[in-house]
Image (cartoon, rainbow, N blue to C red):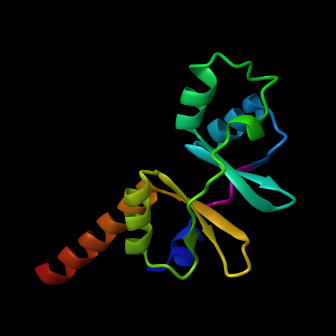
Amino acid sequence: MLLKELVTKRDHIVSVDSAATIRTAAVAMATANVGCTAILEENRLVGILTERDLVQRVLVKELNIDQTLVSEVMTRKVVVGKADDQIGKAAQLMRKHHIRHLPVMDKSGALLGVLSIRDLLREEIQDMRDYIGQTEG
């Protein structure tokens, strides 16, 4: 399965502007029940903010969540997947870079969505169930 097919199963992209406060980003993540949010400037991906970023770069440093901007603590060097990549390639990227979230971009550079390691595992488990179901009959 291609990443563009998997990402379309997601409801919507959770994103905030880079000028948003940490509280705004955390509320957006909590409301959507996701572990990261895409950070956009003029609809262009400029970073991501993950739960790990919040712990390591905000909570541990006791930053004020109402005064600290997302741009100050977000991950700027974002590893991305391509829409036409296979799930296996996404899993390799995530393992290689020790990441749990992978933004997926189309050929024009537009953000299609963000996949989590859980999304990939869920798809692999379903593929295994389908395979087992086919071989039992």
Quadrant of the rendered structure where residue 71 is? top right
Where in the figure is residue 102, as x and y percent of width and height? Answer: 54, 59
In this orientation, which residue lies closer to the viewer: 11 or 133?
A: 11
Where in the figure is residue 39, as x and y percent of width and height? Answer: 73, 50
User: Residue visible at 60% across and 45% down?
Assistant: 36
Q: Residue furthest right?
A: 42
As for residue 116 lying within the magenta part, the answer is no
In this orientation, which residue lies closer to the viewer: 136 or 106?
A: 106
**Quadrant placement of the C terminus:** bottom left
User: Residue visible at 60% across and 31% down?
Assistant: 54
Left or right position of 23 against 103: right
Question: With respect to residue 37, does 61 lie above or below?
Answer: above
Q: Main secondary structure of the magenta part?
A: loop
In this orientation, which residue lies closer to the viewer: 22 or 96?
A: 96
Question: With respect to residue 42, does 107 lie above or below?
Answer: below
Quadrant of the rendered structure where residue 21 is? top right
Where in the figure is residue 85, as x and y percent of width and height? Answer: 49, 79
Question: With respect to residue 126, does 108 lie above or below?
Answer: below
Find the magenta span and give its range.
11-15
Question: With respect to residue 23, does 108 lie above or below?
Answer: below
User: Residue visible at 36% across and 60% down?
Assistant: 121
Left or right position of 31 against 88: right
**Quadrant placement of the N terminus:** bottom left
Left or right position of 108 against 137: right
Where in the figure is residue 52, as x and y percent of width and height? Answer: 52, 36
Q: Residue furthest left?
A: 136
Q: How many marks?
A: 0
User: Residue visible at 66% across and 77% down?
Assistant: 106
Q: Residue furthest front?
A: 77
